[in-house]
Amino acid sequence: MMLNLRRKCLTNTRAFLSPLLLSNSSFSSAIPYPSFISHAPTSIPPQVVNWESGLLVTGFKNWFKSRKNPLMERIFEILKSSDEKDVFSCRNADWALSLLGLPLSETFVLQVLKYGNHVLPSHKRDHVLPCLKFFDWAGRQPGFSHTRATFNAIFKILAHAKLMSVMLDFLDTYVKQRYVHKVRFYNTLVMGYAVAGKLDIALQMFGKMRFQGQDLDPFTYHVLLNALVEEACFDAVSIVLMQLKMRGYENEFTQSIVMKSLCKQNQLDEAEVFLRGLVSGGQMVNGKVLGVLVDAFCKNKEFEHAGKLVDEFSQSGVVPMEQAYGVWIRDLVQARKLDCALNFFQTKKCIEGYVPEVLRYNILLCALLRQSRLQEVYDLLMEMKEVQVVPDKVTMNAALCFFCKAGMVEVALELYKARSEFGLTPNSMAYNYLINTLCGDGSVDEAYHILNNSLDQGYLLRSKTFSILADALCRERKFDKLMQLFHSLDHRKQSDPTYDYETLLTNINHDKYISALCRAKRVEDAYWIHGRVNALNKVSSMNSYSHLIYGFHKSKRADIAAGLLLEMQDKGHTPTRRLFRAVICSLCEVYNPEVQFGQLLKMQLSRPDPNIQICNFIIGGAGHAKRPDLAREFYEMMGRNGMTPNLRSDILMLHSYLKSGKISEALNFFNSVRGKRKKIGRKLYDAMVVGLSKAKRSGIALEIFRENRKQGMIPSLECYEELLKVLCSEKKYDMAIKLISDMEKDGRHVSSFIGNTLLYHSSQSRDVYDALNYSRDTCNQLHWVIAVFSGHKRADTKVEDLVEMIQQCFPLDTFSYNMLFRRLVMDHIDDAWELFNRMRQKGYEPNKWTYDILLPGLIEHGRTVEAKILEEEMSHQIYSPQHSNLWTR
């Protein structure tokens, strides 16, 4: 669809550009029409696409420039260059304007003010000051006096820009100006205060005039009457309307205001009667009267009746219909009846030659854009060009958005870069589309530049657009620009209190940026963002806190890590064991760790809901940091603060002593716990045996192990595994075999860990087999497997039979397969390779040891193909061969 749309764009643009091309014969002959316009292939060569994109840019530039008036541009260039605080600069501007020889008249002044208000590119209210400067300059020129119409125009500019304070100051001080005596003083004041919405003051002025025997002119009467209707002061409306009619000032503008008054009061039946009365009375009816009534029925959701009115008066021909048609199209679009609006527009265009004003075209353009009906958007843009509708700011922004949505970002970008040529001021929607499209196109730097520009121009970006760009910067690891983006928002908030920074930041997922910065080792930047989020009373996620704490742990900032740990608990998160371990390890590395650790303990115990699990995390963390003294201090503090340590607390305290090699302290604590508790259970015994085994104190471990079994408790599998491991490492194989016998009597099976330990040691020493011969309690299969691995028995059986025999003894794992590979690789490489493939088929993944065993054997036996396969797998697994010169040996 995008390709077809691009082709149609190019075809229509060529037709639009034909006068330009024909005006320059050399240019025309140099660029022939390409054949793919009418018979397009499935793909367009990049160079042709780029060239045709240039045509599109040129066509739209020329159309956009049609709204520019060189004289007006020069006037406002002079006005903008002057500094009102510099007298010399103001005099130069006055002199420059005088040199232009402007034909000052009411009509010309109104044209200048309208141009400044609607055509000039502006950000916020930048256009207001130049308009005021011109108004002031014109009023000081000989032979020209401001009229009610020019005053009303400048008042409306100020009111539309919501510069009421400026407007009121203007009204309070304008009497001092020289041109005030050339207009009716009270008329101007009443008009100004009415437009400013200060109706109480306007009515006071009106009353003062009547008391002095003066009266308003027709123009000011209508301005006052309209302002009263806008503010729903209907009692005053009746009085002023009566005064206006008594003076014979009633005209077509009066009809519109009366209709607006009736509709605002929801007197729709009376309003319709009023309209029909005007028509039947043969009066010249203003088209706006019907438009106001149609709009009122639509707002009241009476679309059927509104449509009948439009049809009826369209056929009668007694009322100008352009205004009513435009209102009907707008209200249909706002009611999400876009297809009805388009059908009506196309019908009236074909039958009556109806060409709406640019405002109505814009309504259709924006509605079609929202629904991504891009083909229709482009058709409408081409139609506007053909009927020579002068585009305004909304039209240009809609065109920019269209090119972004149509995938022609290069065209949109060129138009954006040339915006100063035709006075384009991108709005928020255009900025958002540009940034989103450029990020999707991979042009992140360009998108970042545009976003910064939009912030400088005062636009509030959508949180989705901000997130899209921030995500792209994270993906490309452009963290400097990411932080500049956040700092720009922060600076904007400080410089402009009206900027809705909170809404933007609240709606974005800041947690992913905190995590990304922490992973990039920019934890200080992540902490800065976290601080801004805290200022919004928003809670960072558990993941954010974890990344921050680990980041500050690695950067040796224990104070911040500890503060974050306490903060996350205040925010409702429960820290994990690993987080406490990281914080406590950091505290133990700082100067005077006892004081730092003590402060953390006090803060934890002073919390309103001290948790035994959290306390155990602290004991475990101190033990991991090999500070059993700190762990014991907190253990004792728990008791003093009314918290009784549980069994888990005792086990962690034991681990603290054992990990630090404090065996005597561990035994004392163990005996102390046994003395305090009537029944300590199996877990405490298991912890003691496992800890002593890991500390290579097999004698004491065996003693406690036997005591455990005597009391009728069955030790855990881990207990058997660690004890057997240390016995084998000390070559106490007879005790190890006796341990296996006890384990089987307790109903436990030989685990993979125990079986692999026996296989490994039997391959290192024949003493394991000898120990088995003295024991009559082990299974025959295990005896046979150990005999094979220790070399006492020749393995004449097939590899699969050996594997099956091992499986009858214990479950195989990757370590078991590696032991088999070690036996097979030197003399039975084919069997080793076949076993490797079978291992993969069963779901076992090789590790680095697997590759280190197989790869040299394959190379040694000339199996280069298989060796290359393994080497490639190793590179994908980020493994490197144990010997770098395997291929040269």
Image (spheres, rainbow, N blue to C red):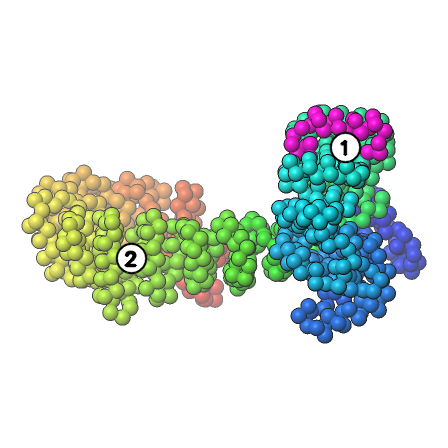
Q: Is residue 312 above or below residue 447?
A: above
Instruction: Please name the amino acid that badge 2 sits on.
Output: Arg
Residue 275 is covered by the magenta coloring: yes
Please provide percent x and percent y for residue 656: 20, 58
Q: Is residue 274 above or below residue 855?
A: above
Instruction: Please name the amino acid that badge 1 sits on.
Output: Leu
Please provide percent x and percent y for residue 682: 15, 44
Query: Pointer 2 and pointer 1: residues touching (CB < 8 Å)?
Result: no
Quadrant where the image shows the C terminus: bottom left
Please provide percent x and percent y for residue 787: 24, 49
Q: Residue furthest bottom?
A: 88
Q: What residue is pinned by disc 1?
A: 290
Q: Residue furthest front?
A: 212
Which residue occupies 40% across, 41% down?
A: 842
Mark 2: secondary structure? helix
If you read the primary sequence from the N terminus, does the residue marked by circle 2 or circle 1 appear first?
1
Q: Is residue 836 left or right of residue 314?
A: left
Q: What residue is pinned by disc 2?
A: 581
Q: Is residue 234 left or right of residue 151?
A: left
Q: Is residue 546 above or below residue 283?
A: below
